[in-house]
Image: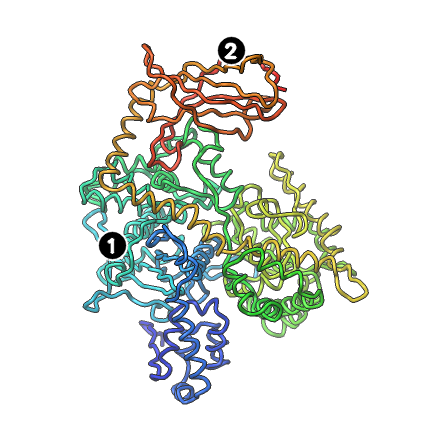
Amino acid sequence: MKAIRRFTVRTVLPEPLRPLGELAANLRWSWHEETRELFRSVHPEGWRAAQGDPVRLLGSVSKERLAALAGDRRFLRRLTAAAEDLADYTAGPRWYQEQSDLPAAVGYFSPEFGITWALPQYSGGLGILAGDHLKAASDLGVPLIGVGLLYRHGYFRQSLSREGWQQEQYPVLDPNSLPVSPLREADGTPARVALALPGGRTLTARIWTVQVGRVPLLLLDSDVEPNQPAERDVTDRLYGGGSEHRLLQEMLLGIGGVRAVRAYCRITGHLEPEVFHTNEGHAGFLGLERIRELSHEGLDFDAALEAVRAGTVFTTHTPVPAGIDRFTRDLVARHLGDGGELPGVDVGRILELGRETYPGGDPDLFNMAVMGLRLAQRANGVSTLHGAVSRQMFAGLWPGFDPEDVPITSITNGVHAPTWVAPEVLRLGSRQFGASRAEDALMIGGAERWEAVADVPDAAVWELRRTLREQLVEDVRSRLRASWRQRGANDAELGWTDHVLDPDVLTIGFARRVPSYKRLTLMLRDKERLAAMLLHPDRPIQIVVAGKAHPADEGGKRLVQELVRFTDDPRVRHRIVFLPDYDMRMARTLYPGCDVWLNNPLRPLEACGTSGMKAALNGCLNLSVLDGWWDEWYDGENGWAIPTADGVTDEDRRDELEAAGLYDLLEQQVAPRFYDQGRNGLPQRWVQMVRHTLSTLGPKVLAGRMVRDYVRQLYAPAARSHRAVRGPAAAELAQWKRRVRQEWPRVAVDHVETVAAEGAVDDAAELGSTLTLRVQVALGGLDPSDVDVQLLSGPVDAADRLTAPAVQSLKPVTRADVAGRYTFEGPLTLDRTGAFGYTARVLPAHPLMATPAELGLVAVPPETEGMTAGVLR
């Protein structure tokens, strides 16, 4: 008979073993090998059955075993040492505490967090990045508070039908079986937040806390008693449901998330965040809640907006417009206006924040990324190339500015090395350089700590690579057998799986989500050519593929099925496999076990692509299109660049050309180098590339480097702005911006001229000479102190466009003339030969703005007919 309700009964540990519960409750165990080894020793078979989850392990250990451990002095000594180490880690000073003038705390909001497979609240790269961000912040001592949602079904579990079609299952997650704890008020009642919904309804959410090392993560759960069934289902699954469902999730994440942070700080005494970081647009409503808070303190909408913007950082993660959430304006107005969640806040102003005002935008839609950019004074993409793509993509929000002047910077993603580096790699490093130095290399970084990789003997490197490959082969065989059983096969049909893959064959990995732009099936473009490489008598390759298509993406599912059908072919199935249900557990064996990591997206649609970073940290070489991080750090010796047909608009032709380039690299460079072994049986050139990859990419791809970049480049300046733009200062800044916008139509560059030095000729100036540039500017009702008149100069292209111009500010040298114009002057130094040009522009200027482009206002000289080119020599 089936139970009508399921729940989890937690173990009560004997007093001597109480620290085990504390260790299990802090997810530092997910990246701390010594703690995992301690749990493994509690019950090795139970540890395997629990799939490395301490909470599940402790729930399955018998009373007799616990009693035995409680009397085992050796075990108790290990337990005491582990507990003391955790206490030192969470309380002792770290990198952040050695710095100055930094935020008291940072709120980090994300719709998903991939911290461990034991807490399945992630779908792909965005969540894994968020988890790595929290872990690295913990290692560095950054006072971060993470905020997300607790999805009762998580993301889906993937399996395959007999025909190779993706199938989805949504397991029910019981919080009592997860490493989460309820946040409680002083009287012991669960802490909750509530949002008002149309029709007098209320959305209530419980706050769960997750301890990620030093960092608390708050997860909001709507599956609570006061809610009606529709409201209880708001946090049912990640990225599920229709528009209204997604809107409610994002309102709970943003608005409810801020309220959860306030409750957490009030209850625990944690310092309030000075900076709020919006990880993609899903959490953008957090800015509206903070505007509401400040409105209740007496600020009007404009002043509150300035105060909120000052302390907000927005990170965009997608170069694909279709990846941005957009809602109808009516839906947003109904939920945020009178009768909804933010009564008293002008819903018209709210709608303007998300309006697509740029050419090609839809004025009837509310764009979450657009709102995120307008609510944040600082914004960034997640690689250098993605920053450039984002500036181009959102340039319409700053009309009149060239894309390179759009105020979106970039911080390249990183990965949390202690999570993703195989224990075997860490042990080799510890033997070679000492445990402390190896740990510092992974957590702190620094090129000097990675240079010692050059001293690791070739034989040790190659032996390590084979060990990791062998572990992957064993894992693949086990997973493949399980998958085929799910597909309906019986054991008598599966003898062939014992011989799938070979630990001595060049192994290529490809694992990621399956949207069309990532091109899962590009490798199948010429199936016979691929089969010939898989079955080559002397230089065979083998490929391990994994990935999930979104449940609503029928096209993605067809790509999965096409790939699976090829891998099912008896002719090649021992050389290429598809593993369903790609998750963090699979990844921890897959990344280290591959020799080559393949990535072939449509350039430039990969924002960053961190899976290749994780592989590289384990000595895997990348074979990738020059997109995302690879465009930035490929150096010709750390892997291979797949040539791209960027100018080809026919998608089918482009795929054909790029697939051919991929095949050529595999046949002519990758496979020959792997199998080119010297007299000592070692492929020395391959090992040299592995060593070079580790020593050069190692310090760059770390999440620790990434978080330090965020602290220095975005968090610290945002905290300073937050402190400066408060109360009267926020009101003054808002009033100044209103005045500038009102007067800007009267601002104009009326005349620009150069004055040559005595004895020089203006149209034949010589290298090294200096001209004086004079600009006459009409400012309407503005004062020279309200603007920055700039000179831009440098080389020009054939269309007379400045390329990488130098920028300098000019100084006012006269009062307003009878026409109300001011003259500004500055030197123009001719520091290079060839085609050279200059222009001038006027921008608003205020000490509390983060960038002159903040208002999206610019005045430039009118284009004139008959402009002549001169020669500067």
Q: Image check: 201 left or right of 601?
A: left
Give the quadrant of residue 650. Answer: top right
Q: Residue at x 33, y 32 (%)?
A: 846
Rendered location of residue 392, percent (x, y) = 48, 34
Which numbered marker is on residue 380?
A: none
Q: Indicate whether 338 appears above or below 449.
A: above
Which image quarter is the N terminus in?
A: bottom left
Residue type at tag 2: Glu
Give whichever of 767, 819 is nearer the camera: 767
Q: How many numbered tags mark residues here? A: 2
Badge 1 vs badge 2, beta-carbon distance below 8 Å: no
Q: Image check: 667 left or right of 828?
A: right
What residue did someone put label 1 on? 203
Q: Indicate whether 721 appears above or below 816.
A: below
Q: Residue at x 43, y 49 (%)?
A: 710
Q: Residue at x 24, y 62 (%)?
A: 267
Crowdedness near tag 2: few (<14), some (14–19) or many (≥20) residues, C-alpha within 10 Å: few
What residue did someone put label 2 on? 865
Q: Residue at x 22, y 50 (%)?
A: 196
Nearest to viewer (mark 1 / mark 2): 2
Give the quadrant of residue 847. Answer: top left
Residue 568 visible: no
SS of the residue at dot 1?
A: strand
Residue type at tag 1: Leu
Give whichever of 220, 288 is nearer the camera: 288
SS of the residue at dot 2?
A: loop
Q: Image check: 589 left or right of 10?
A: right
